Image (tube, rainbow, N blue to C red):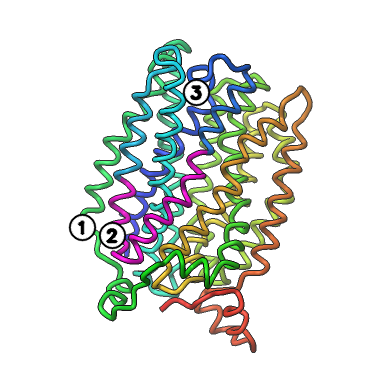
Amino acid sequence: MLRLASASLAGTAIEFYDFFVYGTAAALVLGPLFFPSFSPLAGSLAAFGTFGIGFLARPLGSVLFGHIGDRHGRRPVLLGSLLLTGVATVAVGCVPSYASIGAAAPVLLVLLRFLQGLGLGGEWGGAVLLTAEHAPEERRGLWSSFPQMGPAAGFLLANGLMLALSSTLGDGQFAAWGWRVPFWAAGLLALAGLWLRRSVEETPQFRALAETGRRADAPLTEVVRGHWRLLLLTGGALATGYAVFYAATTWSLAYATEHLGVHRSVMLACVMAAVAVKGLATPAVAVLGDRYGRRPLCLAGCAASALWMFPFVALLRTAEPLLMTLGLLGALLGMVTMFAVVGAYLPELYAPRIRCTGAAVGYNLGGVLGGALTPIVATALADGSGPPWAVAVYLTAIALVSLACFALLPETNPVVVRQRKAPGADAEAGAAGATAPA
């Protein structure tokens, strides 16, 4: 399990490195370089618009790679998604600026960002199923949290490199070529990830499906027809985690540097400190999910997020590094209380024959609802000289919607469900479209 979980963590970290390095570049330099004729606000909105394209592509990637995972196995998903994302990320670093090739520059940027999202949309499903379908049920949450640490590791790697470059290079050098270096480095990371995953074994549950001929012929059709309500609930439930994360890591970076005059190196350091604590907290929270259930932690995380959004904005507004870090940390700890357990939660909601498609599409649908729009909406709402309270209202509203969605989902932890032995528990799970793991 440690070898499998480590391979899953490493690959997920590399893929999220690719995805996050674009978000940081969008917050710092892409607007002036690729949309120079726009006003500063419009340039930032356009850069975050290309950032959002990646989220729109992620559900399509989960459909494509989910079909492969449910029909041909989880292992091909791990290799194909990593290769696609790595190639697209390297190519982003090679796109000339608007000054060199005109309108073709932002067009290429959008196309490559779409391919990044397509690859990442497939990565998550394959990575979590690699651990979830190998793990013993009493420790499924813990082992499935390894891929959930990948985003934090990828974010720290991407932003650490950006921080080093922005601190050592002048503004002109950073804008001319320094921002491209992290994209080029993605090629080496992708090769390393492919090497780590080369010997990964197929999961026992998929092997059993293949041997008995019970694989789904059309996984997406089966998911949409039989579990559409579950799909919508999981997408809405996960929206707040995405919204909070990208408000804390992408929008706050742009807001602090452009509106508050905080140097980009200082703000990157604040964000990275908060993300590092989030990553370390992930397995500890997952252990609680194995002990007390997935659903209670998700409900607690949504409630904490709803309560913290106004303090988050107030602390960010101070422009004091320690207070900003405190605000970011509170937001991310509320988010990780949910996301530490979803690596086990979502696969447990679907039968093995449609699990790769169902879990991945639900997860990435939440990304569209919460991640794609948040930097754009928050940037528009924060335009002006006063405190961006409208951003706090927006994030709080998303948290409350997610709270309602989680309230309608069943508990899936098989150990907790057996301990409760509550009358009608099976009926509740069946009404929500849940299927206990094989």
Front disc: 1 or 3: 3
Earlier in the chain: of badge 2 and badge 1, it is: 2
The magenta span reads 53-82
Reading the image, the residue beneath label 3 is 30
Q: Position of residue 105 (x, y in %)?
A: 43, 22
Judge from the rendering whether residue 33 lies leftward or rightward of residue 84; answer left or right.
right
Reading the image, the residue beneath label 2 is 75
Q: Position of residue 338 (x, y in %)?
A: 58, 58
Query: 425 or 146, which lies in front?
Result: 425
Q: CA separation, marks 1 and 3?
A: 38 Å
Q: Which mark is residue 143?
A: none
Q: CA separation, marks 2 and 3?
A: 35 Å
Q: Residues within 10 Å of mark 2 (few under 14, many from 20)?
A: many
Q: Residues within 10 Å of mark 3 (few under 14, many from 20)?
A: many
Under mark 2, the amino acid is Arg
Q: CA separation, marks 2 and 1?
A: 9 Å
Reading the image, the residue beneath label 1 is 199
Q: Residue at x 66, y 60 (%)?
A: 300
**Which SS type dominates the magenta stretch?**
helix
Q: Residue at x 30, y 64 (%)?
A: 73
Vertical side of 16 occupied by 168: above or below: above
Under mark 1, the amino acid is Ser
| Figure quadrant of residue 189 | top left
Under mark 3, the amino acid is Leu
Q: Residues within 10 Å of mark 1 (few under 14, many from 20)?
A: few
In this rendering, does residue 141 appear at all? no
- Confirm or deny contact between disc 1 and disc 3 (CB under 8 A): no
- Confirm or deny contact between disc 2 and disc 3 (CB under 8 A): no
